């Protein structure tokens, strides 16, 4: 029997959700709701919960997973080297191993106040598009900053000057709930020093990006385009204030336009390209999909530095890393039947959060891997772009994403962030120190949902956070 608090919360949530024309039963957990990734769901909730292979892999596939894992975890070295399978790092780079950013395959974080490098936070750069640079923007999604390119690398091999040092400070302000409870929010203030190649273009656009969790990426890739597009409403035809839309991006393999899925602005169409971009921009490693280097014409020492072969990441290695990144399992949810969690779920839906954080999809029957096919999954994301308002805007467009738009981040695994990554810093730049702060930064299309949350009392806030921490 639900408690009086649970019944009251349920009625409130159903009333708030009435404009959806639906009245779901939030009084009990749905069948298999704990299985966030269908048969691929893993049963770990410790600090290594995000580093597990999908539960439905065979013994042979687990060996393939382990091979990909080794290239994801172990450091790359400077060329030339006797370690020819792992040489070619740089000349400019952000880190020497993927795992340094995706800590235990989890979430990155902003640098500490006096850190010499940012490690798991990247700084993307670009300048405004002009008619003369339209072809570059069509291919890359942005126009690179002339001296520093599209991403700032704060580390370099000997003999090459790092591009800059990234440091952050914070401005703060507070928001109050209807019951007077105050939450301090912080906004990062970017500080660049030690610029290695001269002053930046005066119209440079900056975007801070922390490394996202790696779990469930193959399942997100396997959601049919039609299922994602069914949730798109670019002109807000239904009048609910939510106008999610897809990003249309460049597929380097086919040279065609494709639906964007990965990255904070859905700037990459698939995991293969996402991995190749990370190898090139984060580690300075070339592949057949992304050949060459990340040096700009002004960086002569970078251009003259030794490489690790052509390409440095061969197709076999890239395929092993792709298999690994497709099959990192999603942990099972916890306490799905707990009355407080169910009450929080009702409030989540009632406030309108699920209109962007879509709970459930079924992956395609013809997915790239049989292990990913026909799975009922619960990522809590529509993978679409949404205008999140001035507060979160980076004012940097990427393909069709505007400077105010962000892809809805999946929420699965949210409650294990501290256990896995050692912190709870959220949003694209890590400004939110916990889920409540992240909610309160929501503006634009999410303003109405945030304002409903601001009306919650202490019990309702606790219930909402209990639900989010169960994911």
Image (cartoon, rainbow, N blue to C red):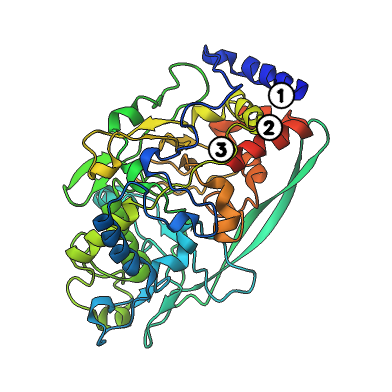
Does residue 167 lie above or below 157 as drawn? above
Q: Seen from this angle, which residue lies furthest right?
A: 180
Residue ID at (67%, 29%): 339
As drawn, is 365 to the left or to the right of 389?
A: left
Between discs 2 and 3, the one toward the N terminus: 2
Does residue 115 lie above or below 382 as drawn? below
| Rendered image quadrant of residue 41 | top left
Q: Residues within 10 Å of mark 1 (few under 14, many from 20)?
A: many
- Residue 300 lies, in percent from the top left, at 30, 80
The secondary element bearing badge 1 is classed as: helix
- Residue 27 lies, in percent from the top left, at 61, 21
Residue ID at (53%, 45%): 393
Between discs 2 and 1, the one toward the N terminus: 1
Residue 462 in view in this figure: yes
Q: CA distance from mark 2 to mark 1?
A: 7 Å
| Residue to which mark 2 is pinned | 340
| Rendered image quadrant of residue 243 | top left
Which part of the image, by quadrant, shows the C terminus? Answer: top right
Q: CA distance from mark 2 to mark 3?
A: 31 Å
Residue ID at (32%, 36%): 223
> 355 or 345: which is nearer to us?
345
> 131 or 434: which is nearer to us?
434
The secondary element bearing badge 2 is classed as: helix
Residue 147 in view in this figure: no
| Rendered image quadrant of residue 64 | bottom left
> Badges 2 and 3: C-beta atoms under 8 Å apart?
no
The secondary element bearing badge 3 is classed as: loop
> Badges 2 and 1: C-beta atoms under 8 Å apart?
yes
Q: CA distance from mark 1 to mark 3?
A: 33 Å
| Residue to which mark 3 is pinned | 389
| Residue to which mark 1 is pinned | 6
Q: Residues within 10 Å of mark 3 (few under 14, many from 20)?
A: some
């Amino acid at each position: 029997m639900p408690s009086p608090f649970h019944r009251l919360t349920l009625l409130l949530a159903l009333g708030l959700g009435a404009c959806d024309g639906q009245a779901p039963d939030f009084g009990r957990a749905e069948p298999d709701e704990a299985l966030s990734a269908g048969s691929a769901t893993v049963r770990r909730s410790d600090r290594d919960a995000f580093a597990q292979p999908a539960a439905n892999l065979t013994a042979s596939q687990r060996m393939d997973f382990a091979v990909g894992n080794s290239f994801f975890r172990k450091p790359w070295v400077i060329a030339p080297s006797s370690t020819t399978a792992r040489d070619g790092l740089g000349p400019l780079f952000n880190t020497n191993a993927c795992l340094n950013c995706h800590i235990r395959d989890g979430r990155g974080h902003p640098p500490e106040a006096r850190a010499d490098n940012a490690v798991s936070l990247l700084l993307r750069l670009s300048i405004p598009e002009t008619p003369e640079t339209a072809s570059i923007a069509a291919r890359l999604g942005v126009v690179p900053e002339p001296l520093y390119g599209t991403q700032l690398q704060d580390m370099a091999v000997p003999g090459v000057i790092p591009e800059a040092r990234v440091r952050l400070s914070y401005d703060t302000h507070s928001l109050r709930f209807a019951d007077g409870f105050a939450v301090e929010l912080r906004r990062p203030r970017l500080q660049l020093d030690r610029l290695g190649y001269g002053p930046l273009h005066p119209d440079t656009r900056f975007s801070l990006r922390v490394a996202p969790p790696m779990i469930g990426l193959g399942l997100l890739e396997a959601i049919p385009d039609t299922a994602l597009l069914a949730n798109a409403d670019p002109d807000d035809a239904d009048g609910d204030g939510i106008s999610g839309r897809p990003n249309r991006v460049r597929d380097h393999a086919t040279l065609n336009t494709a639906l964007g899925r990965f990255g904070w602005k859905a700037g990459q169409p698939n995991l293969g390209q996402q991995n190749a971009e990370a190898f090139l921009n984060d580690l300075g490693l070339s592949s057949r999909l992304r050949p060459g280097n990340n040096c700009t014409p002004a960086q002569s020492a970078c251009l003259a530095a030794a490489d690790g072969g052509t390409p440095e990441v061969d197709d076999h290695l890239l395929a092993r890393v792709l298999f690994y990144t497709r099959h990192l399992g999603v942990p099972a949810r916890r306490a799905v039947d707990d009355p407080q969690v169910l009450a929080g779920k009702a409030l989540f839906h009632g406030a309108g959060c699920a209109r962007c954080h879509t709970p459930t999809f079924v992956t395609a029957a013809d997915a790239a891997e049989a292990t990913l096919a026909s799975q009922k999954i619960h990522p809590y994301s529509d993978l679409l772009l949404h205008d999140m308002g001035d507060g979160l805007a980076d004012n940097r467009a990427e393909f069709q994403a505007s400077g105010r738009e962000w892809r809805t981040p999946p929420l699965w695994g949210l409650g294990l962030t501290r256990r896995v990554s050692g912190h709870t810093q959220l949003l694209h730049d890590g400004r939110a120190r916990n889920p409540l702060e992240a909610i309160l930064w929501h503006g634009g299309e999410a303003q109405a949902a945030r304002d409903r949350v601001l009306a919650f009392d202490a019990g309702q806030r606790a219930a909402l956070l209990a639900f989010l921490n169960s994911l």
